[in-house]
């Protein structure tokens, strides 16, 4: 992904990423994961009509309802949040090592949340 911009949609932070071919991809910022002094974002893909179609009826994925839900994989990515030359936040792809660290931090956060319940 190359061009990234942030669109504030009320409570949801929507990230628009544009690839080299000009295709735009929309992601909702699900959570911020701190790792040391750095921040990473867990981004979940937003798929417009497909998302609305699945919201029309409640069901478990893989339920055999015929809506295609069992074929749909959730589009989730991790992005490192850095400041650009203007001081604005930019989302970049983390290194493999950073990704591993974020995954460990995310697992620890989830374990902590489960312990609270």
Image (tube, helix red, strand yellow):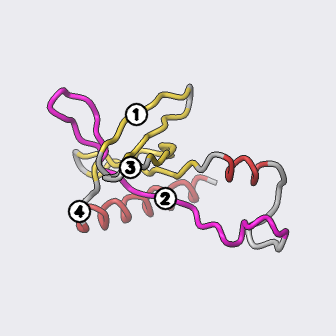
Q: Is residue 105 left or right of residue 87?
A: right
Q: CA distance from mark 3 to mark 4?
A: 15 Å
Q: Is residue 32 left or right of residue 84?
A: right
Q: Quadrant of residue 108?
A: bottom left
Q: CA distance from mark 3 to mark 1?
A: 18 Å
Does residue 96 belong to the magenta stretch? no
Q: CA distance from mark 4 to mark 2?
A: 16 Å
Question: x, y percentage for residue 80?
Answer: 29, 49
Q: CA distance from mark 3 to mark 2?
A: 14 Å
Question: x, y percentage for residue 102?
Answer: 34, 59
Q: Nearer the viewer, residue 39 or 26?
A: 26
Residue drawn at point x = 60 percent, y = 50 percent:
47
- Residue holding disc 2: 76
Mark closer to the observer (3, 2): 2
Q: Residue furthest front?
A: 21
Q: CA distance from mark 4 to mark 1?
A: 22 Å
Looking at the rendering, the stretch of residues picked out in magenta corresponds to 65-91
Mark closer to the observer (3, 1): 1
Residue 95's disc number: 4
SS under mark 3: strand
Q: Are marks 4 and 2 in contact (CB under 8 Å)?
A: no
Q: Quadrant of residue 117?
A: bottom right
**As drawn, 62 above or below 53:** below
Q: Which badge, 3 or 1, comes first in the chain's sequence?
A: 1
- Residue holding disc 3: 33
């Amino acid at each position: 992904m190359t061009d990234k911009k942030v669109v504030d949609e009320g409570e949801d932070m929507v990230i628009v990423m544009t690839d080299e071919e000009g295709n735009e991809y929309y992601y909702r910022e699900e959570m911020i994961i701190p790792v040391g002094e750095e921040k990473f974002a867990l981004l979940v893909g937003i798929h417009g009509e497909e998302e609305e179609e699945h919201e029309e009826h409640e069901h478990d994925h893989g339920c055999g309802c015929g809506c295609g839900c069992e074929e749909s994989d959730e589009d989730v990515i991790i992005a490192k949040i850095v400041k650009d030359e203007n001081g604005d936040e930019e989302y970049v792809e983390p290194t493999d090592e950073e990704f591993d660290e974020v995954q460990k931090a995310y697992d620890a956060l989830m374990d902590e949340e489960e312990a609270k319940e």
